[in-house]
Amino acid sequence: MTESIIRLDDVWKIYSLGKAKVNALQGLSIDIKHGEFLSIMGPSGSGKSTAVNMVGSLDIPSKGTIYLEGKDISKLSESDLAQLRGKKIGFIFQQFNLIPTLTALQNITLPMMFQGINENERVKRGMELLEKVDLKDRMHHKPNELSGGQQQRVAIARSLSNDPDVILADEPTGNLDSKTGISVMSFLKELNRKDGKTIIMVTHDNHLAKYADRTVYLKDGKITRKL
């Protein structure tokens, strides 16, 4: 049986708004296997974003346990969590989140700097990743000199910079036209099939679910169904 890479066990996230308590997640349990392509779906306010934060080790639960490769990360310090996250998980965001003053190559190599990789190795790997996403001729361009699709490809390359086991894609086609969106999804599917990356995609778009091996539906912070 394929081992789990990320497992959420009865995870709750409770926020305090004044005297009121808001249950953003209510007993969420998800078991994600190595090499799986999982889609997490749900309407606005369903808890998708909070689930992303938990799966991506961006936040810790109010109750419950999160395991990354069998290790309980629920109680790690923020600095330890950041180091683990940097090595194990690559992030792709709807808004691209590229740094506007940096070139495509510099945006891609930045996460490697935080992992202590030397400059020569960073540039070498950055060039390889730009070639992988077919943007080597745009390496010195800044985000405002790139199309939306090109920016998202730079963001994908950046997510791969530390060769993570998991790619977490949060509404990865939300700011793209349909043709470019299909191209991005095909690339993610290729990363899953050929490179063996575990892909976790959060979306509200039913059309994107077909790319996933499995889909989990959320509503009011709970899983309502699994396909």
Image (spheres, helix red, strand yellow):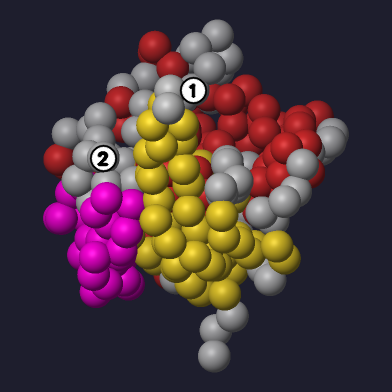
Residue identified by numbered label 2:
45
User: Does the magenta run of residues contain 47?
Assistant: no
The boundaries of the magenta stretch are: 202-227
Answer with left or right where residue 177 lies relative to residue 158: left
Q: What amino acid is found at the position of numbered circle 2 in the picture?
A: Gly
Answer above or below: position of 110 versus 71.
Answer: above
Residue identified by numbered label 1:
98
Identified at 27% across, 72% down, the residue is 226
Looking at the image, is mark 2 or mark 1 nearer the viewer?
2
Answer above or below: position of 122 versus 11.
Answer: above
Could you say whether the residue bearing mark 2 is in a helix, strand or loop?
loop
Q: Residues within 10 Å of mark 2 (few under 14, many from 20)?
A: few
The quadrant in which the N terminus is found is bottom right
Which of these two is toward me, 131 or 68? 68
Give percent across and percent down for residue 154: 47, 33
Residue 201 seen in the current view:
no
Give percent across and percent down for residue 114: 76, 32
Answer above or below: position of 173 versus 89.
Answer: above
Say which quarter of the image contains residue 6: bottom right
- Mark 2–mark 1 Cα distance, whole angstroms, equals 26 Å
Q: Residues within 10 Å of mark 1 (few under 14, many from 20)?
A: many
Give percent across and percent down for residue 212: 30, 65
The quadrant in which the C terminus is found is bottom left
Q: What amino acid is found at the position of numbered circle 1 in the picture?
A: Leu
Point out the residue furthest to the bottom here.
1
Say which quarter of the image contains residue 77: top right
Answer with left or right where residue 112 lies relative to residue 196: right
